[in-house]
Amino acid sequence: LAKTTQPISMDSYEGQEVNITCSHNNIATNDYITWYQQFPSQGPRFIIQGYKTKVTNEVASLFIPADRKSSTLSLPRVSLSDTAVYYCLVGTNDYKLSFGAGTTVTVRA
Amino acid sequence: DADVTQTPRNRITKTGKRIMLECSQTKGHDRMYWYRQDPGLGLRLIYYSFDVKDINKGEISDGYSVSRQAQAKFSLSLESAIPNQTALYFCATSDGSDGAGNTIYFGEGSWLTVV
């Protein structure tokens, strides 16, 4: 399981773009990069997943450089409801899933 | 209805008591997991099961046991609960499909307090 490193916390204001970078220097060839969001007292939920380049969905964008040693989750125009913990996971179908402390994003009015 | 259902949602138990947390899923997934979450520590894997006949220890299995009764059911037991097992417990499932990374679906969580 590739080790990941992400900031402990980030603060932002409503309407701003939030970018969270995750480092995964020992990512393996078959590994995917997946981000989850967790609200207080709820289970994490899937946000986005990618392998290389850029992936975009209705919630976020994921940027992955060519060397895949890092990735950046981009949340456009955040609102108060985007306040949550965001987790970066790297692995394949057979990886034993563990979540680190994640990044606590606090959005202020 | 939730795809991954945990019972009970909240439980207070006494030290030394046996407690079972149950999980059922309607997603048809083979893979099921139990995690615990403590403040500031993210989610730590307790046990995981890739099919009915497969049970594996996770990062923090001591003091816990599991049973995979069917594809859809995976229960977690604390044989003799202790206060430091007070935590929020999550059950999760994934399909482990080929050709893509593993996407995990979580239950709503079970708050367990051991006094």
Image: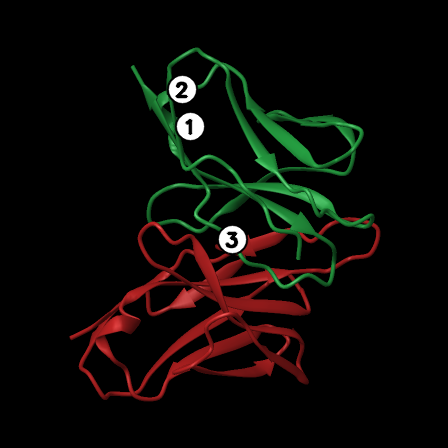
Chain colours: A green, B red
Mark 1 belongs to chain: A
Q: Nearer the viewer, mark 1 or mark 3?
A: 3
Label 2's element? Answer: loop
Separation of disc 1 and disc 3 at Cα?
19 Å
**Residue B51 vertical position relative to residue A74 in the rendered view, above or below:** below
- In this view, the residue in front, B20 or A75, is A75
Disc 3: CA contacts within 10 A as few (<14), some (14-19) or many (>=20): many
Mark 2 belongs to chain: A
For label 1, the residue is A82
Separation of disc 2 and disc 3 at Cα?
25 Å
At label 2, the amino acid type is Ser
**Residue A37 vertical position relative to residue B107 in the rendered view, above or below:** above
Separation of disc 1 and disc 2 at Cα?
6 Å
Q: Which residue is drawn at 48% across and 48% down?
A: A44
Label 3's element? Answer: loop
Mark 3 belongs to chain: A
Contact? badges 1 and 3 (CB < 8 Å): no
**Residue B81 vertical position relative to residue A83 in the rendered view, above or below:** below
Label 1's element? Answer: helix
- In this view, the residue in front, A23 or B66, is A23
For label 3, the residue is A99
Image label count: 3
Image coordinates of residue B36 in percent, x first then y, are: 41, 64
For label 2, the residue is A79
Image coordinates of residue B67 in percent, x first then y, are: 52, 84
Contact? badges 1 and 2 (CB < 8 Å): yes
Disc 1: CA contacts within 10 A as few (<14), some (14-19) or many (>=20): some
Contact? badges 2 and 3 (CB < 8 Å): no
Image coordinates of residue B64 in percent, x first then y, are: 42, 81
To the question of a shared chain for discs 1 and 3, the answer is: yes
Q: Which residue is drawn at 54% across and 42% down?
A: A5
